[in-house]
């Protein structure tokens, strides 16, 4: 029988309302700060445009991860909605809490990839399995990282 860390785990993230509302709150707070700061009107308009573009990019971006496959140990495949596939490795910088998982992966080109998954980003069972697997794997991949350096 395979250990939990050797089984393939497939995740299909959805758009998270938690992250959407958090980002909206963050951008609105920044918007109010821009208007209350004593800045030239040109800088204020530039900041407003930047905030609007950044929020719109998150909401309407077409190239989001459509499927994440945890192959074994810390090996991942990320399939984007643009049909691009990237292989990556989980790094020790990843974060885990009861309602949020931040996966920090290093792609095959060395580029860092950060995926933020709130509990409403995945089906309930997928989110639970991801958290359980990360808890059981974390000491193992930390030792692997120390051995590589």
Image (cartoon, grey):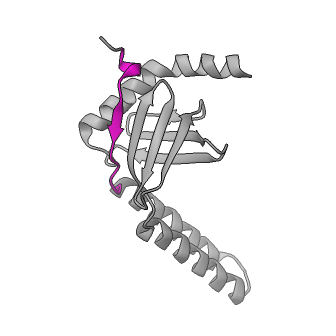
Residues rendered magenta in the picture? 3-16
* The C terminus lies in quadrant: top right
Residue at (42% x, 33% y) in the render: 70
Q: Is residue 113 above or below residue 128?
A: below
Which residue is nearer to you in this view: 144 or 50? Answer: 144
Work out whether residue 56 or residue 10 is closer to the camera in this orientation and state it: 10
Closer to the camera, 148 or 138? 148
Left or right for 94, reference 78: right
Residue 88 found in image quarter: top right
What is the count of numbered marks? 0
Q: Residue at x 35, y 57 (%)?
A: 15
Please tell me whether residue 134 is drawn above or below residue 49 in the rendered image. Answer: above
Task: Point out residue 31 in the picture as x, y percentages from the top left corner.
Answer: 56, 74
Q: Residue furthest top?
A: 1
Q: Is residue 88 magenta?
A: no
Q: Is residue 100 above or below residue 2?
A: below
At a point 54% along the width and 75% down the height, the residue shown is 53
> Which x, y percent locates residue 40?
74, 86
Q: Is residue 9 magenta?
A: yes
The quarter in which the N terminus is drawn is top left
Q: Residue at x 42, y 45 (%)?
A: 117
Q: Position of residue 10 (x, y in %)?
A: 33, 38
Please provide percent x and percent y for residue 34: 63, 75
């Amino acid at each position: 029988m395979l250990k939990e860390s050797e089984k393939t785990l497939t995740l299909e993230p959805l758009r998270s309302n938690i992250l959407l509302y958090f980002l909206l709150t963050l951008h609105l707070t920044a918007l109010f700060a821009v208007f209350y700061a004593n800045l030239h009107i040109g800088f204020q308009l530039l900041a407003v445009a930047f905030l609007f573009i950044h929020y719109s990019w998150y909401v309407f971006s077409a190239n989001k991860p459509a499927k994440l496959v945890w192959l074994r140990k810390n090996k991942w495949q990320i399939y984007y909605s643009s049909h691009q596939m990237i292989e990556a490795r989980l790094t020790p910088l990843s974060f885990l809490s009861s309602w949020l998982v931040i996966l920090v992966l290093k792609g095959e080109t060395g580029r860092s990839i950060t995926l933020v998954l709130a509990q409403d980003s995945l089906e309930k069972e997928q989110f639970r399995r991801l958290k359980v697997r990360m808890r059981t794997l974390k000491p193992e991949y930390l030792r692997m990282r120390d051995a590589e350096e």
